[in-house]
Image: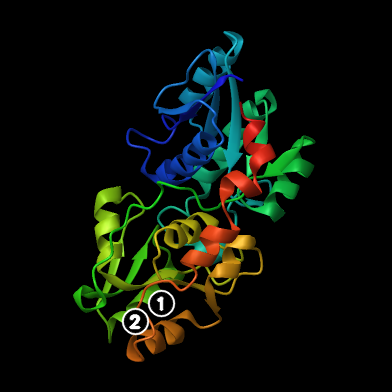
Amino acid sequence: MSKVALVYGNHWNFGIVVADTLSMIRNALLELGIDCFLSKELVLGSHNILLENFTDEYVEQLLKFNKRGGTYSIIASELLINNSFNDLGIGLSGAKLYGNTAYWDDRFNNFLKVAPLAEQLFHLNPQHAFSYSELLSMDVTFFPHGYTSNFKTVNHRTDDGKDIDILFTGSMTPHRQKCIDSLATKFNVHVADVLTASFYRDDLISRSKLCLNIKQSTSWQVFSNSRGNFHLNNNSLLISENCDQACHVLNYIQVFDDIVEAAADIIDQGLWRGNSQSFAQYKDEQKLSSIAKDLLLSLA
């Protein structure tokens, strides 16, 4: 078995948006006795795992790395729509990140340049793993989320010490803003950007009665498995809008068609007390090193 390097350097200097996923994979690999480590840079002599996000410069770096004998696998997470990433048209117009079609087109084209050289390709959503397979004429395997030891980073306050009613973390879109504005007329709602420092995010969650998974737009049908997995691992109460495309993580999350009405009812009725009711079940049934053992072993 070779060592596994979990590389974050293609996600800016601090790797905030991929820290949870890479930590989850690292923990599961260590549970299986596989030698692995986090690295900002690509590492020769180890098999490198990267979450998709490739600039022109990073493409050049990966191609040179491959010519020197370096190996890597890629885990993708974006939606494949209209031969690009996240192309949902007018539903995301006005969104700073998701409405930037030029950014997503460039990111998609760069992915196509380096994907054929990857040892393995994965996707964090089962339906889109199939779509990627069809596009690339390559096997793209669904990479699940799950419980891992040493993942928990949130130390919750007591119920009486929670001073934030509702928390949302992530990139802002018009639909998300509308939901938040509606709730903010009655409750103490806090919003944290997707690039919020992890230690600050964890403190916010520890103070929050309820956290939300709001879809990017009304037509967006993919549940954020990464967000759900984080909150389940941290015994944090998260509710979600109804999403047609999901995986096993959503089975442990309360789902509503009207998330604004549901959030208001949960706060008003005190149903948030005690944090998540699914933590113990998720820990018992979805241990990643068990449910994805063969997949994880294939990385080494």
Callout 2: SS: helix
Work out whether 290 lies above or below 6: below
Q: Amino acid at mark 1?
A: Cys
Graded by Cα atoms within 10 Å as few (under 14), some (14 to 19) or many (20 or more), the crowding at tag 1 reads some
Instruction: List the residue tagged with mark 1.
Output: 179
Q: Callout 1: helix, strand or loop?
A: helix
Which residue was labeled with disc 2? 183
> Who's the residue at 74% across and 49% down the image?
131
Q: Amino acid at mark 2?
A: Leu
Q: Looking at the image, which residue is at 50% across and 34% down?
A: 30
Image spot of residue 269 (x, y percent): 36, 91
Placement of the N terminus among the 4 image quadrants:
top right
Front residue of this view, candidates 184 and 26: 26
Identify the residue shown where x is 51% and y is 62%.
92
Q: Residue furthest top?
A: 68
Looking at the figure, which quarter contains the C terminus? top right
Between residue 22 and residue 133, name the one nearer to us.
22
Q: Position of residue 103 (x, y in %)?
A: 49, 43
x and y percentages locating residue 110 in the rendered image: 57, 32
